Amino acid sequence: MYDLNELKDICNNCYKCELCKKRHNVVFGEGNKNADIMFIGEGPGRNEDLTGRPFVGKAGQLLDKMLKSIDLKREDIYIANIVKCRPDNNRNPNGDEIKACLPYLRWQVKIINPKIIYLLGSVASKVIIRDDFRITKERGNIIKKGDLYIIPSYHPAALLRDESKKRPAFMDLKKLRNLYDELNRGD
């Protein structure tokens, strides 16, 4: 089994899809390597590609505020994406790109071994839960797979575009916090 550093080295040398041709940096993921909570988005944007860090643009700043609202910070969680390289023009990653990168994410999940995965947006939810997942109708539902709990919600970028989604997203975060507290009472 890999450790995170070995897996990151493999990702940094990946050329399995077309995204590698235009990337500045692989955006592997970051945070607490022993986190109980893992956040997963769809893929890096421009700022992330330039810095090599996930969620550092406006959506990332909002994510930091969201975490703070439930008494968490980046150091408490682990953040990753479905794809590790930026799709051009901030488009959604396509099937071939997802297929090439998904094994890396699976390894990250296996290594981190979180109790809860919080999915940020429709793309992540469709990849992790099922193809026909409807984020507006199904977000906030807690899905249990084995010992793992999955909570899909809106992507912070969607909240920046549509203020009406902020309240439902906050309700999802409260569910996350409550579930986290409940699971840790049993430790």
Image (cartoon, rainbow, N blue to C red):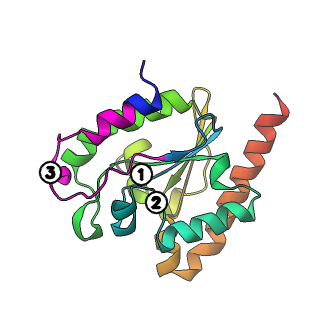
Mark 1: amino acid: Ala
Marking on residue 121: 2
Q: Position of residue 98 (x, y in %)?
A: 27, 45
Q: Residues within 10 Å of mark 1 (few under 14, many from 20)?
A: many
Give, as a three-letter code, the residue at label 2: Gly
Q: Distance between the Cα atoms at labels 1 and 2? A: 6 Å
Q: Is residue 22 magenta?
A: yes
N-terminal of the pair, mark 1 or mark 3, is 3
Q: Secondary structure at mark 2?
A: loop
Which residue is depicted at the point 52% across and 63% down?
Answer: 154
Pointer 1 with pointer 3, Cβ within 8 A: no
Residue in view at x 46 percent, y 26 percent: 3
Query: How far apart are the alpha carbons under marks 1 and 3?
Result: 20 Å
Q: Quadrant of the C terminus?
A: top right
Identified at 34% across, 35% down, the residue is 9
- Residue at left 19%, top 50%? 20
Give residue 124's mark.
Answer: 1
Q: What amino acid type should be assigned to the residue bearing mark 3?
A: Glu
- Percent position of residue 39, x then y: 54, 49
Q: Nearer the viewer, residue 141 or 39?
A: 39
Look at the image and give the residue range highlighted in magenta.
7-29
Question: Viewer-proximal residue, 187 or 9?
Answer: 9
Q: Is residue 68 left or right of residue 128?
A: right
User: In front here: 172 or 87?
Assistant: 87
Q: Quadrant where the N terminus lies? A: top left
Give the Cα distance between marks 3 and 2: 23 Å
